[in-house]
Every structure is written in C-alpha cells, then in structure tokens.
Image: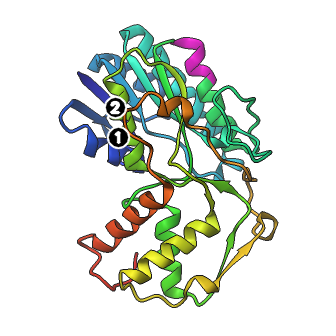
Amino acid sequence: MKILLLGPHGQVGRALREHLQDYDLVPLDRETGGDLADLDGLHRTLVQHHPQVIINAAAYTAVDRAEREAEQARLINAEAPRVMAEAARHLQARLIHYSSDYVFDGSGTRPWREDDPTGPLNVYGESKLAGEHAIRAIWENHLILRVSWVHHPQGRNFIRSILKLAQERERLRIVADQHGAPTPARLIARVTRELLARPEIRGTYHLAPRGETTWHGIACRVVRRATERGLPLRLDTDAIDPIPSEAYPTPAPRPKNSRLDTRALQALIPWPLPPWEAGVDDTVEALLKQPHQPHGNPIP
C-alpha cells in the first residue's frame, strides 16, 4: 500500500513515520511537492505519486496568529484539504485527515459527540471546520479524526513549555477552567495504523485518551513526574496557581469544554484507549532521555 504523508515533520507526522515504517510511505514536505500553500502544485504532486492512501498530518496550528492571518489559516486548513479530496477522488484513494476539538463552541460539560452541532470560537477552529466540510462534500472515502491537545517529545507543545518554565521560575499561573484530554501523537498514529487495515471505515470520529483534566492538571502532572525522575526544578505543584481563562487573555478565545466522546472510535479498535496520564508521563520520560538532553540539563 502506497501512502502519501503530508506534514511529516510535525508532531503527528513524526509519530506516523515511526508507526508506518513497514508501509510504502512517501513523506511530502514543502521541498518535495507538499506545499499546502501551492494548491495547483499540491494537486499535481498527489496525482503524480498515485497513492492508495493520502494522510494529511499538516495544518496551520498557530491559533492566536490565525486571528490576524485568517486567509493563510483558511488556505492551509480548508483549501488544501479540498484539493486533497479532489485528488483522492480522481485517484479513488482513501483520504485520512486530522481535525480539532476547536470546531465546537466549548459550552456545557458533556463530552462532544461526532454529530453534535459545531460552533468554532476562533479563526483556527473555523478553518478546521471548513476543511472538514470541504472533504465531506467532495469525496466519500475519507476518515476524519478529531483530536485534542496534541503532544509529542519532538516539537513545541505545552509539556515541553512547562518543563522549561519549571526550571526557570519559582511560580506559575496556569488556566484551570478549560477541560479536555492531552492526546499523544503516538496514540494518534497507533489508531491510524489500526484503521488503515479497515478500509471500510469512513466518516468522522473523535480520538482522545480516557479521562479528562485541565491545563493546570497537566502542568501539575508534568512537574510531579519530572521531580520523581530527578530533574532539578525551581518549583513544585504547590507553586502552580490555578487561574480562570479570563486571567490569561489570548487573541483567540479558547473553548472551555474540549471533552471528546470517543465511544464510536473505541468500538472500532480492539484495545482500550489509554488514560491521559500515561501519555503525559511517556512524553516527559522521552524528553528527559533525548540524546541532546543530558539528564539534569535544562529542557530547551
């Protein structure tokens, strides 16, 4: 099976390359024809490779910057997936695409189901939702996985930031009223691999670990785990203050309820989705073991 992977250097892309090594996997980045801002070139490249599967792990993810770069966000997150769907239809190929919890408005406390009404609060969420709509309108053989709060040992993410800040500061103020589940990119890749073997599965599914927490809860877990592993920190969990979203204003408003109902996906895979704590612990462990990161040195 020949698979084209767009976005091979991002968090999800890196994890997919780890999990799909035994496939005929062709990574496409900007230099090799996978420039999502060049729609005509993108279409030509996809068709020329003639894959059986196209996986789109690329996205415009700068949530706050998207508020002032709305056209760029829509180009990458909506127009490029439209082109992928057109190419997949032309090739009769399967299209796998990753979307976001940000397509919802964050109201209530119940985990969001796949068929719940959407209502993005920011430009990023709007662009991701537009990408979903474009794919559904063009090609039926698609799989859209909505994910939340992605992390991986490589790349920029909240866990790396907390480890760095905990080595520099004596106190932190972290938002505690946004609820969801931090999702390891490696879990996304593992689920993707499972579903690759099931070509009959189509549609939209929610993917997240079991349980729920807040950004404050993640920060406390990270600090606790790093302390147990002997990383010198300047603070402990008592010095991580919970604050409301209003105390940490951002250009793009964030949904307070990012819980995802994963029951539909869980029914398709033969192993239980892991708890969110396990994924956070694994990422902390991997960060502390990186070759360029001798134990006890500051996290870059």
- The three-letter code of the residue at mark 1 reads Arg
User: What segment carries the magenta color?
Assistant: 133-139
Q: Main secondary structure of the magenta part?
A: helix
Q: Position of residue 58 (x, y in %)?
A: 45, 39
Quick one: label 2, few (<14), some, or many (20+) residues within 10 Å? few
114 left or right, relative to 89: right
In the rendered image of this protein, does residue 229 appear above or below residue 257?
below
Q: Are marks 1 and 2 in contact (CB under 8 Å)?
A: yes
Q: Position of residue 134 (x, y in %)?
A: 60, 21
Quick one: label 1, few (<14), some, or many (20+) residues within 10 Å? some
In the rendered image of this protein, does residue 228 appear above or below residue 91?
below
The residue tagged 2 is: 194
300 left or right, relative to 161: left
Query: At x 58% / y 17%, what residue is drawn?
Result: 136
Residue 110: image quadrant is top right
Q: Position of residue 24 (x, y in %)?
A: 20, 29
In the rendered image of this protein, does residue 153 appear above or below residue 113?
below
Query: At x 17% / y 34%, what residue is drawn?
Result: 22
Quick one: quadrant of the C terminus? Answer: bottom left
Report the disc number at residue 190: 1
Query: At x 38% / y 34%, what residue is drawn?
Result: 192
Q: Residue furthest left?
A: 22
Residue 250: image quadrant is bottom right
Quick one: quadrant of the N terminus? Answer: top left
